[in-house]
Amino acid sequence: MTLASWIVLALVVLGVVLLVLIALPLLPKLGRLKRAADVAKGKAAEAQALQAELERLQGQVLDVQTKIETLRPAR
């Protein structure tokens, strides 16, 4: 191998080592982000269930209001 090939190989190895050294401190943050995303998904599912319950209850309120209007004597 020529000197230029050795220099290129050394630069590639140095680049990989630097990338690993930069990425290692970020791994715990990535784990926290993943857990936060899981919590957010759970909250979104809970919000969706509550929204469905709200719509069901609003439908019941409208039904009751309609029944009241039909039973109320005309003035």
Image (cartoon, rainbow, N blue to C red):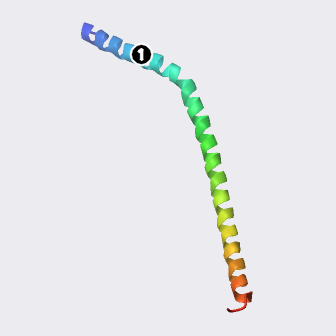
Seen in the picture, residue 21 relative to 46 is either above or below; the reply is above
Helix, strand or loop at label 1? It is helix
The quarter of the rendered structure image containing the C terminus is bottom right
Q: Which percent across, then down, holds residue 17?
A: 43, 15
Q: Specify the farthest residue to the front.
A: 75
Q: Which percent across, then down, holds residue 46?
A: 66, 52
- Asked whether, in this view, residue 68 is left or right of residue 30, the answer is right
**What residue is shown at x 58% (from left), y 36% (from top)?**
34
Which residue is at the front of the view, 3 or 63?
63
Q: Quadrant of residue 31?
A: top right
The quarter of the rendered structure image containing the N terminus is top left
Q: Quadrant of residue 72?
A: bottom right
Q: Specify the farthest residue to the right.
A: 71
Q: Quadrant of residue 67?
A: bottom right
For the residue carrying disc 1, how many other residues have a C-alpha within 10 Å: few (<14), some (14-19), or many (20+)? Answer: few
Which residue is at the front of the view, 66 or 55?
66
**What residue is shown at x 70% (from left), y 68% (from top)?**
57
Q: Amino acid type of disc 1?
A: Leu
**What residue is shown at x 72% (from left), y 91% (from top)?**
73
**What residue is shown at x 60% (from left), y 43% (from top)?**
40
Which residue is at the front of the view, 38 or 4?
38
Q: Which percent across, then down, holds residue 71?
A: 74, 88
Total of numbered circles in the picture? 1
Q: Specify the farthest residue to the bottom.
A: 74
Q: Which percent across, then down, holds residue 42?
A: 65, 47
Tag 1 residue: 18
Which residue is at the front of the view, 9 or 70?
70
